[in-house]
Image (cartoon, helix red, strand yellow):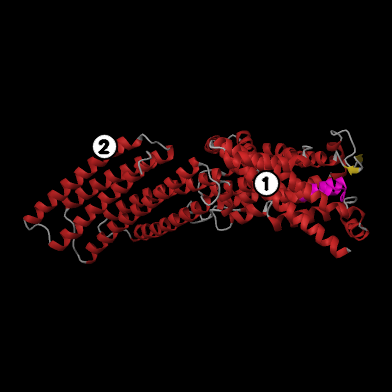
Amino acid sequence: MDWELFLSISFALVGGLGIFLIGMRFMSEGLQAVAGDRLRRMIGAVTQNRVMGLFTGLFVTCIVQSSTVTTVMTVGLVNSGFMSLAQSLGVIFGANVGTTITGWILVLEIGKYGLPLLGFAAFFFLFAKSDRIRYLGMTLMGIGMLFFGLELMKDGFSPLRTHDGFRVWFHAFEATSYAGIIKCVIAGAVLTMLVQSSSATLGITMGLAAAGVIQFHTAAALVLGENIGTTITSFFASLGTTTAAKRAAWGHIMFNSIGTIWFVIFFPVVVPLVVSVIGHDPNTVLVRDGVETFPYILRSIALVHTSFNVINALLFLPFLGALAWVLQRMFPDPDAREIKRLTYLDVRMAHSPSLGIIQSREQIHVMGDAVQKIMGYLKNILTREHGDPLAEEKLFRRETILDEMQKEVVLFIGHLLAGEVPHKVTEEANAQIRMAHEYEALSDYQTNVLKSWIKLRKNNLAVSEEGLNALLQLHEQVDRYIHMINQAVRRNDAQALTQARIDGNTITRLMKETRKQHLARLANDEVAPMKSLIYLDMLNHYRKMKDHALNIAEVLAGHK
């Protein structure tokens, strides 16, 4: 009998939880598709204002239905240099508040309508021709799956209420004492760390409570632990990143951990005070159609979850500067300057394409900055008689990093486009792949200029003063051109193509004039043939740099 009961509960839990999680994903992707443009504008508008950061984190998390995704994205944006530590902490605080929306969705008493809602919405998703209606249908499908999954879990857990063996075992986890509260907090934290989804563990907790298997105080303590367990994802996201990103991740850990500690200490006072708002005992049992129900327990759990995160955000927000100071002492600035690049493009972001495309876009900006930096190194090398070994080493290293960045973008966007992705996100993703390719190719020609210069030096072939001045003039023109293109990319300025073509033609004319003057010196036996070949190659490399930069402007304009 026990074996049959175990199988019955296991099947209901696995099936219900699976449908619940897929519902979360469908609802998230549908909402993102509908609100995608607004979502990206909000992320781009984050300022040093801590309150604005909090509301941004709250709004984004309500849309994506995952504080994990918001936090991972925030750590990535801090790592790339797009977002400061103070900005990120405000967004993370808001993400914690935003994730409580899941609990309130589950409070709606429409559990038995979950399956009909799923079926009804599926017709819109499958047959609607308008993208907006399709994604609205997808959102409703997700909501239907949430409630259907929760009902399956609740029905599956119901037999445990009368099972003597389970009741005796679970008695050790009841939050009727500080020891029991701490055990529940630890259990909630460990379970969330294992599944890496606080929404999943919240669904299980609410399923147990709705079935009457666990009492309210036990469920409340489990929810507190789940808030600690969810920080494991930001910790993993910070591995291998810059010091600033580590500070952001640990800010999330400290926020949730310290908040949980004080909530546990005052648990016997705070929790009853919060629940008094409901006006009913959360453990109240009502019989409807011969079935025992617990009409107040779910809303009580949702209220505790929300109160925990809202109160903590309000308490921490005035001390955001102090928290940043502590984090800076925990993780002091390194002696060597760190390269701000996205070494961590989390695959989980592929489930949130509207946010994932923001993270990969920052990768493109970092590539543009790296190419600009290489132009500075190259100028230092060309203007020094004996070269600049340190600049040469940095140039080669950055070119290698740009190769890796391009691979990161292509692989990440490949994952991003594997699911149900809005048309606008697909267009931007394809443009980003092309721009990543152009930036990487541009860096190859920068490196070719250096290789040619080293070849001249090794063969004791000095460039004349006239030839060097002409080369440096061309270098300055291309440098300014790349800077203009980079600024257009950051503004997403499709109108920049016209100016890019005009300036590009100017560079081409300058390159041809420089080549003409050089060939004249060659005809007068002023230049050795081997030196001439290398010099002409260098001129051609600069023209190729211009061509790849122009291609980026054409991508912005939607021409390629």
| In the displayed structure image, the side of residue 518 where residue 20 appears, left or right | right
**Residue 442 can be seen, yes or no:** yes
- In this picture, is 48 found above or below 540? above
Residue sitting at x 46%, y 43%:
428
In front: 408, or 374?
Answer: 408
Residues in magenta, as a range: 204-221
Question: Which disc, if any, is residue 502?
Answer: 2
Which residue is labeled 1 in the image?
23
Task: Give the mark, 1 or 2, whose residue is nearer the N terminus.
Answer: 1
In front: 429, or 80?
Answer: 429
Image x and y of residue 274, in percent: 83, 37
In front: 441, or 519?
Answer: 441
What amino acid type should be assigned to the residue bearing mark 2? Ile
Residue sitting at x 77%, y 55%:
13
- Look at the numbered disc 2 and give the secondary structure of its residue: helix
Image x and y of residue 257, in percent: 73, 49
> Furthest-left residue in view?
524
Image x and y of residue 487, in percent: 39, 39
Distance from the alpha carbon under mark 1 to that under mark 2? 52 Å
Query: Is residue 161 highlighted in magenta?
Result: no
Q: Of tags 1 and 2, which is closer to the observer? A: 1
